[in-house]
Image (cartoon, grey):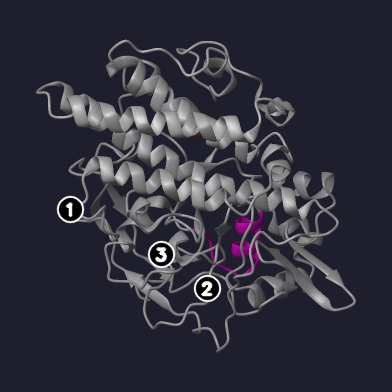
Amino acid sequence: MIEPAIAQCASTESPGERFARVRNWTDTLTAPLSAEDCCVQSMPDASPAKWHLGHTSWFFETFILERFEDGFRPFHDAFRVMFNSYYHAVGDRHPRPQRGMLTRPPLSFVREYRRNVDERIARLLASRGDEKGLQEDLLALLALGINHEQQHQELILTDIKHLLFMNPLKPAYHDAFSQSEQPTMPMAWHAFDGGVVSIGNSGRDFCFDNESPRHRVYLAPYRLASRLVTNREFLEFVRQGGYRDPKFWLSEGWDWVCANDLAHPHYWLEDERGWMEFSLAGLRPLDPGLPAIHLSYFEADAYARWSGARLPTEAEWEHAAAMPSSCGEFAEGKLFHPAAAKQHGLSQLFGDAWEWTQSAYAPYPGFRQPEGAIGEYNGKFMVNQYVLRGGSCATPADHARATYRNFFPAAARWQFSGIRLARDMENGTA
Ligand SMILES: [Fe+2]
């Protein structure tokens, strides 16, 4: 039986208290940003912080207040379209690549929208939250909205990092940074017998629809690396010509490398000081002991092939996550950069960096898309993407769990994504 390795919210915390805490964390994350920082969109995949602030409020207004609030009236009629991300059932949407064109409304008005939604949700919970029948639906949607907000908190950080990196000043978001300081743990291999195991969420606590149902899979015996691949190890791949030799790359990945003239990870650059890495603390010397991050699936797969290993499947990863392991850095540490592996045994499964798996993002056997607009949340994206596991240095700790399935296209590398290696068992032994 695999239980979530990370505790869910403290049992003493009421839904209303959790709502307030998570919403406040979004405000904390955006506090260092200027109004100009919050407005600009650096690429179609990334959204301005102002849009994230509005969209997360829109989610609560559209899916909870519109349904449960007596005498509902939207805060602003135009926000229904402006802050709708991809919900066709809700109606029209402002084009995603044009979210950075929204110089109006001003940031102050979007923050006013957030406060208005916060007050109305608090009022709703206080007045009707304990009504029989209402409570179950309302609290389920509230939990979804809170977890949705936490997903956007991570996106706020990855999107602002992408934006700041494009600025020639290479400005810092904050002045906290991580250093490996002492030698990183040598990579060890942990053996798993495999067999018929169960993965997926049984639904006792909150989970997204894509994590269910829990089901059985067969795993051949395998080995899993004890920690994430480090900058030192990935730099060796770069220096030995890993980006120049097609034999390490998937065909589509090699086309991607050539078309974009790639030779190293996205936030690395080499100047007279040597190899540098851009972090949310600005441009700093590449720290060899820290995990290599912001890698695409193509890069992760090529590195694994070059090193004589492979990426794990998501079932292998989840099975291993039932073992005791030490966690990495989460958002609460406020570094927003992974830390070095310092513990013996399995480490960094949770936190530090999302880990690419070789598993295509597909429905589990028996998956049923929920009815209505909310059914558009996950199910319709189950094509042309790969599953990542574990959470990152930008993920809130109570948002991570063993069954969590994150997903991105193979070329995406603006997320905090790294590499954990796996190997087949040779001759049935480790
Ligand atoms: Fe969203």
Give percent across and percent down for residue 265.
72, 60
Please state the extent of the stretch shown in magenta in the rendering.
299-311
Q: Amino acid at mark 3?
A: Leu
Indicate which disc, 2 or 3, sits on the residue closer to the N terminus.
2
Quick one: quadrant of the N terminus? bottom left
Return the residue at label 3.
349
SS class, disc 1: loop
* Inter-mark Cα distance, 2 to 1: 29 Å
Q: Position of residue 39 (x, y in %)?
A: 70, 37
Q: Which residue is mark 2?
A: 339
Q: Would you say residue 91 is visible in this rendering?
A: yes
Res 92 quadrant in image: top right
Whether label 1 lies within 8 Å of ligand 1 gets the answer no
Front residue of 330/209: it is 330
**Whether residue 24 is situated above or below residue 64 in the rendered picture:** below
Instruction: Check disc 1 and report the residue beneath it.
Output: 11
Q: Determine whether the residue tagged by mark 2 lies in a helix, strand or loop.
A: loop
How many marks the image carries: the answer is 3
* Tag 3–tag 1 contact (CB < 8 Å): no
Q: Residue at x 49, y 79 (%)?
A: 187
Q: CA distance from mark 3 to mark 1?
A: 24 Å
Vertical placement of 296 versus 320: above or below?
Answer: above
Name the kind of residue labelled 1 in the image: Ser
Magenta stretch containing residue 108, yes or no? no
136 up-or-down from 298: above or below: above
Query: Which label lies toward us, 3 or 1?
Result: 1
Question: Mainly helix, strand or loop, the magenta region?
Answer: helix
Q: Is residue 301 magenta?
A: yes
As measured in the structure, the alpha-carbon distance from the residue carrying label 2 to the one carrying label 3 is: 13 Å
Q: Residue 101, percent across and down?
A: 74, 27
